[in-house]
């Protein structure tokens, strides 16, 4: 193998619900992408951080075979890990310390560089891997997951070979993922409930007579009202209709927010990432509706949209290249 193919960067991300490890060659080829979902008990609506930390430690131990294969077949030039949720001061979650400390230990053992990034930047970078957007210098990035619903203005910063990120929209209370899971569990589905809700919505042929009331202002949304509205009618309609009604509200909330923000910041491209964006119903509707407003929406492949470490590895490649350039 060539130098570009034989030398790789490892990416590690330990988020609220997934243990992820990936590898990308210096030639930008994804070599490896492995993830283990954290276990959530039936009828539960989530995990405590302490429970998630314990499972991450266990899962990283189970990935030893994959790591041995990588060490045997490739030269690891660096490890890039999500050490916190966002690239801002004070951002912290215990789950990310598991990946950080594991990466420190691994880098010491194999004598390679360690780079730090954030879960937010990881998602943005992963979403750009398979989306050929026209202007990578300036765009909106939407992260819709179990813990987060944020709309970000991303501007490329040449000096740091990365993005300056500003939160310009999103939810002010619960996330879309929390909303969908809460309603899904209420209807009797296991957590996480997104895939069941999505299938129901796609299979529902009944036309929505009156959508749920939305609360959106200047790119920001309030979703707790939606949850209350659904709970009032959840026994009156079948599961397919309730699911369609719920995802229709997700689409209309996001549509209103993005229309406002594309005008406010003069952008016309939006990249979506996060577990909720893997919904076929949501992606189809938003692509069609945003096109009417001359805005291009890009949805990421599920393996890169849901929590993963491919973005971390991609960021690590950039950081390695930057450091190499310093010595030229």
Image (cartoon, rainbow, N blue to C red):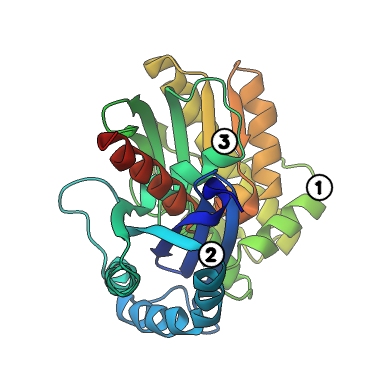
> In this picture, is 113 found above or below 54?
above
Q: Residues within 10 Å of mark 1 (few under 14, many from 20)?
A: few
- The reply to whether residue 278 is in sight is yes
Nearest the camera: 265 or 221? Answer: 265
Look at mark 2 in the image and give the residue it sits on.
181
Name the element at disc 3.
helix
> In this picture, is 38 found above or below 10?
below
Residue 91 placement: quadrant? bottom left
Nearest the camera: 113 or 250? Answer: 113
Q: Residues within 10 Å of mark 3 (few under 14, many from 20)?
A: many
Q: Nearer the viewer, mark 1 or mark 2?
A: 2
In the displayed structure image, the side of residue 52 where residue 88 appears, left or right: left
Question: Mark 3 or 2 closer to N-term?
Answer: 2
Name the element at disc 1.
loop
Where in the figure is residue 247, as x and y percent of width and height? 62, 48
Which numbered dot is residue 206?
1
Residue for point 35% across, 26% down: 155
Look at mark 3 in the image and give the residue it sits on.
252
Question: Mark 1 or 2 closer to N-term?
Answer: 2
Residue 28 placement: quadrant? top right
């Amino acid at each position: 193998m060539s130098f570009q193919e034989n030398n790789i960067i490892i990416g590690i991300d330990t988020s609220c619900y997934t243990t992820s490890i990936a590898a990308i060659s210096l030639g930008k080829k994804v070599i490896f992408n492995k993830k283990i979902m954290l276990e959530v008990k039936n009828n539960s609506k989530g995990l405590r951080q302490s429970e998630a930390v314990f499972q991450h430690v266990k899962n990283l131990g189970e990935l030893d075979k994959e790591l041995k294969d990588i060490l045997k077949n490739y030269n690891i030039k660096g490890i890039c890990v999500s050490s916190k949720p966002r690239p801002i001061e004070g951002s912290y979650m215990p789950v990310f310390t598991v990946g950080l400390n594991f990466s420190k230990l691994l880098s010491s053992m194999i004598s390679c560089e360690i780079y730090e990034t954030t879960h937010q930047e990881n998602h943005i970078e992963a979403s750009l891997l398979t989306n050929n957007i026209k202007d990578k210098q300036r765009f909106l990035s939407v992260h819709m997951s179990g813990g987060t619903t944020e709309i970000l203005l991303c501007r490329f910063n040449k000096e740091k070979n990365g993005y300056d990120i500003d939160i310009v929209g999103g939810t002010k209370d619960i996330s879309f993922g929390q909303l969908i899971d809460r309603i899904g569990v209420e209807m009797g589905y296991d957590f996480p409930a997104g895939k069941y809700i999505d299938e129901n919505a796609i299979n529902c042929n009944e036309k929505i007579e009156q959508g749920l009331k939305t609360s959106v202002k200047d790119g920001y949304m309030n979703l707790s009202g939606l949850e209350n509205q659904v709970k009032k009618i959840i026994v009156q309609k079948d599961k397919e209709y309730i699911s369609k009604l719920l995802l229709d509200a997700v689409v209309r909330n996001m549509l209103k927010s993005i229309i406002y923000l594309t005008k406010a910041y003069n952008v016309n491209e939006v990249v979506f990432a996060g577990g909720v964006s893997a919904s076929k119903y949501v992606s189809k509707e938003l692509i069609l509706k945003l096109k009417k407003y001359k805005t291009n929406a890009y949805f990421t492949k599920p393996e890169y949209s849901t929590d993963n470490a491919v973005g971390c590895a991609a960021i690590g490649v950039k950081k390695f290249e930057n450091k190499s350039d310093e010595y030229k």
